[in-house]
Amino acid sequence: MIGNDLPSKSDVVQLYKSNGITDMRIYLPDVEAMNALRGTGIGLIVGVANDILIDLAANPASAASWVDANVKPFVPAVNIKYIAVGNEISGEPTQNILPVMQNINAALAAASITGVKASTAVKLDVVTNTFPPSAGVFAAPYMTAVAKLLASTGAPLLANIYPYFAYIGNKKDISLNYATFQAGTTVPDPNTGLVYTNLFDAMVDSVYAALDKAGAAGVSIVVSESGWPSAGGDSATIDIARTYVQNLIKHAKKGTPKRPGVIETYVFAMFNENQKPGEATEQNFGAFYPNKTAVYPINFQYSGEFSTDGKLAGTTMARRQGVASMLTIALIIGAFASAPTTVQSIGVCYGVLGNNLPSRSEVVQLYKSKGINGMRIYYPDKEALNALRNSGIGLILDVGDQLSYLAASSSNAAAWVRDNVKPYYPAVNIKYIAVGNEVEGGATNSILPAIRNVNSALASSGLGAIKASTAVKFDVISNSYPPSAGVFRDAYMKDIARYLASTGAPLLANVYPYFAYRGNPRDISLNYATFRPGTTVRDPNNGLTYTNLFDAMVDAVYAALEKASAGNVKVVVSESGWPSAGGFGASVDNARAYNQGLIDHVGRATPKRPGALEAYIFAMFNENQKNGDPTERNFGLFYPNKSPVYPIRF
């Protein structure tokens, strides 16, 4: 941090937590800051200093040493998401970026560290021809090579985006309203017909256009810096800074005309820093003064709706310092308006086993109207996939009954990806491929070869950002009490877990406290099963305390992953819910208590893995043609006529 009057690192982390700020960027691997982040769940971008890139590029051993010193001692206690290999590199040193990223990736793999993505943080002048946005193209060949590597690893491009600098450099053509998300300006792109109402979107989409032209259309953008100064220069006032930052928070959940949906964004910066060099504005980008009081009122979770995200890219901007302030606010969007969750924490499963359900397009509209940002479908339903185009809704796509077909040969998997993924992505935001759902018996032998074949097909199609996994029942775990005793029941699950660790994919787990409660109401209280207060259970092996069954079940899965040498694999809860009728404990009151409790809870995740947990509620609708127990037809949040089964806050 470039200031002599700033709070301690532990005070800073506490300030993030007290304001609901869920992610942070630091520009060097600061040991004090990283220790303060342990167990907080705060997502982190860690920077590699510009001045050591030449060594890390030339020597894989140096990259391995950097990972051993700056990553390995902290994960998973510190939620490191991305490694920024350099910040705003220019000139001849740009040739070091790609080899350093390759060496860091190799070092992470050798250290069995998965889920941490290596990228680089770029200035906006890496793109030329930024108007109209569709004309954007990378200015130098090295960026095309970087983009292709990111496409192969599933990592995002980190972009520092500043409409402020574009505005002060060209006030004649750019209005203040357009630069700060205020109404009054409409700019059509003549090549695409897309209409822009703010500069932020236009900049982002010019970078996406450049990625498209580089053969890396599947690469997402994370805005690693964006902000507006409150003093020290042209148009730098508290009022304008507050307008920009608050509108960024409000707007970014919508995405851009080219890529609707949420975008992960880091606001620059946490504090005004009195020792930053350069223009006076450089000392005045902070949201807080060093005494931890706010520079201006700001709502980090905008009207209780979502925290934010946004992507930016494209126009030429004024030169920034290579190493900026140490701490940056990250405002990551949640899925439900009222839930204190982070990005896309809650989705809803969309089953279609009914003869009275709405059309696919009506269903997608219902998701959007309720602010539901994630969906799971159980086979490649082309009508649903087409309805999802440009909605921004994140998708788990199941392979349906094709498991044995996909396991049989790589050519089968390639054909499946060609027919069911490539025609839709990235217009449809496919996040995960579920290769099998609750597979049992001899068919479990097909899971791993099918996942391998699908992964190979995705990679060869330039779709490496989509992760292949499988969705498992909770009974893959034995010894689930206490949670720390959890272990995989069968050897095949250990092989799957290790493979997921090598690819950075999560394990998809269907977690149902309802069935555990129904099977053992003598030992499991209803309150404990439905997130209601009154029960505390301590794990004697690690001292962790549980106040709900959901957390205990998820942590049993994490314990099993650790015992399978796959401790860095995250869990995505691919189904969870409670029936409102049809059987023991199935009532509207219990269903509402459970599902509302789940929505409100996932932003905190579990005692073993604090932070946000991605979860999908089962299901969107009551489905009158589902087989089995009557409860199976009553898990829906909505009736087929789209009216809610019970009030719930999305």
Image: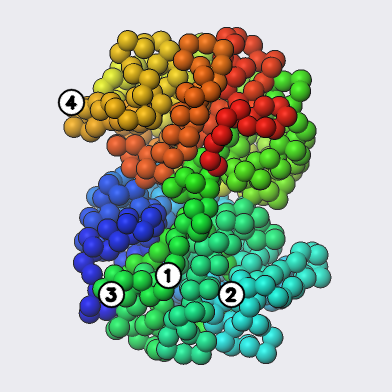
Please tell me the numbered disc located at residue 238: none
Of marks 1 and 3, which one's residue comes earlier in the chain?
3
Q: Is residue 399 visible?
A: no
Depth check, mark 1 against mark 4: the one in front is 1
- Between the residue at mark 1 and the residue at mark 3, the CA separation in whole angstroms equals 16 Å
**Residue type pointed to by label 4:** Pro
Of marks 4 and 3, which one's residue comes earlier in the chain?
3
- Between the residue at mark 1 and the residue at mark 4, the CA separation in whole angstroms equals 45 Å
Q: Which residue is mark 4?
A: 540
Q: Position of residue 605 (x, y in %)?
A: 37, 39
**Residue type pointed to by label 1:** Pro
Of marks 3 and 2, which one's residue comes earlier in the chain?
2
Q: Which residue is mark 3?
A: 290
Labels 4 & 2 near each other (Cβ < 8 A):
no
- Between the residue at mark 4 and the residue at mark 2, the CA separation in whole angstroms equals 54 Å
Say which residue appears at 64% left-offset and 67% top-offset.
201
Q: Position of residue 390 (x, y in %)?
A: 70, 50
Say which residue appears at 71% left-offset and 43% top-offset.
365
The image's colour scheme reads rainbow
